[in-house]
Image (cartoon, rainbow, N blue to C red):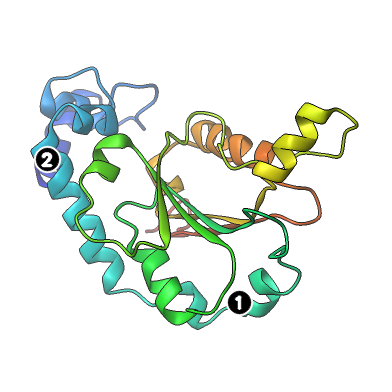
């Protein structure tokens, strides 16, 4: 689907007078004659979804991992609430087949806490090999984040939620935000920010950063 979109792009841009695409209809929709965005379209086409997951997994395997140059002790491990029942160390939001989390686990096998992989149902169902220590969770990052941290309350109900879901130490997004407009990125991030535990949770973004012009 990527190659088809690229090949179709000159025709699409010529037809739209080379304007910056705005709104939901763009080159992908024109190339595939659909009103769906790419990921909903992929969910309706399992083979193409599997091909896309293969591409993303191969792409990630050839890059330097963030934890090989960042100070993981300062960012994650120091101050981690590992004594809290069901404490979550790292949530990989939209993490595909879990390659990043598995690489992290292999690098830090003694790190405490849960590692949670989140992605759409067809992606999770497509996973054939992943370490048993990594929890697979079906999640759409356009919906409220399911691993939450809550402020203290005298409510027994809220206290129970704090014990069950104490908030992740970190939420990690790799190669997610560049797929979306600024407005959509804000929606994705707001769901995560709402779930974060103030003064404890952290947001890790591994992403391409390009200037607005001259790329």
Which mark identifies residue 207?
none
Split into 4 quadrants, where in the image is the C terminus?
bottom left
Q: State the residue in front, 164 or 186.
A: 164
Q: Which of 131 and 91 is in front in this view?
A: 131
Crowdedness of circle 2 by 10 Å Cα count: few (<14), some, many (20+)?
Answer: some
* Residue position marked by numbered label 1 in the rendering: 72
Secondary element under disc 1, as helix, strand or loop, is helix
Which residue reaches farthest right?
154
Q: Quadrant of residue 151?
A: top right
Q: Dot 2: what SS?
A: helix
In the displayed structure, does residue 168 sit left or right of residue 185?
A: right
Q: Mark 2 points at which residue?
A: 48
* Residue 153 appears in view: yes
Count neighbours of disc 1 (C-alpha within 10 A) and say few if under 14, some if 14 to 19, many if 20 or more. few
Residue 13 seen in render: no
Disc tally is 2
Left or right side of 132 for 54: left
Q: Image point 39% across, 21% down: which residue?
A: 23
**Percent x, y for residue 62?**
27, 74
Compare marks 1 and 2 and give the one earlier in the sequence. Answer: 2
Q: In this view, does 157 lie to the left or right of 91?
A: right
Q: In which quarter of the image is residue 88?
A: bottom right
Measured in 3D between alpha carbons, the distance from the residue under mark 1 to the one under mark 2, in whole angstroms, is 36 Å
Q: Position of residue 181 (x, y in %)?
A: 46, 36
Residue 19, above or below 129 = above
Name the residue: 38% across, 52% down.
95
Percent position (x, y) of residue 162?
A: 74, 41
Q: Could you tell me which residue is drawn at 48 percent across and 73 percent down?
A: 66
Q: In which quarter of the image is the N terminus?
A: top left
| Residue 40: quarter of image | top left
Pinpoint residue 16: horizontal percent, then vertical percent. 24, 24
Query: In the figure, 47 relative to 107: above or below?
Result: above
């Amino acid at each position: 689907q990527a190659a088809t979109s690229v090949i179709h792009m000159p025709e699409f841009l010529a037809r739209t007078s080379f304007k910056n695409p705005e709104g939901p209809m763009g080159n992908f929709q024109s190339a595939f004659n659909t009103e769906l965005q790419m990921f909903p379209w992929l969910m309706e086409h399992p083979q193409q979804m599997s091909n896309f997951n293969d591409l993303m997994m191969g792409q990630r395997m050839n890059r330097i991992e963030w934890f090989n140059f960042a100070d993981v002790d300062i960012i994650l491990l120091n101050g981690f609430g590992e004594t809290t029942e069901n404490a979550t160390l790292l949530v990989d939001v939209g993490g595909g087949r879990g390659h990043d989390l598995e690489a992290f686990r292999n690098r830090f096998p003694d790190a405490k806490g849960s590692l949670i992989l989140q992605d759409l149902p067809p992606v999770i169902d497509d996973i054939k090999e992943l370490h048993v220590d990594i929890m697979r969770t079906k999640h759409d990052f356009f919906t409220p984040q399911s691993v939450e941290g809550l402020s203290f309350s005298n409510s027994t109900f809220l206290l129970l939620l704090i014990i069950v879901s104490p908030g992740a130490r970190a939420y990690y997004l790799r190669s997610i935000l560049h797929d979306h407009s600024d407005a959509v990125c804000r929606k994705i991030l707001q769901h995560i920010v709402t779930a974060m535990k103030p003064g404890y949770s952290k947001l890790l973004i591994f992403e391409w950063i390009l200037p607005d012009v001259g790329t």
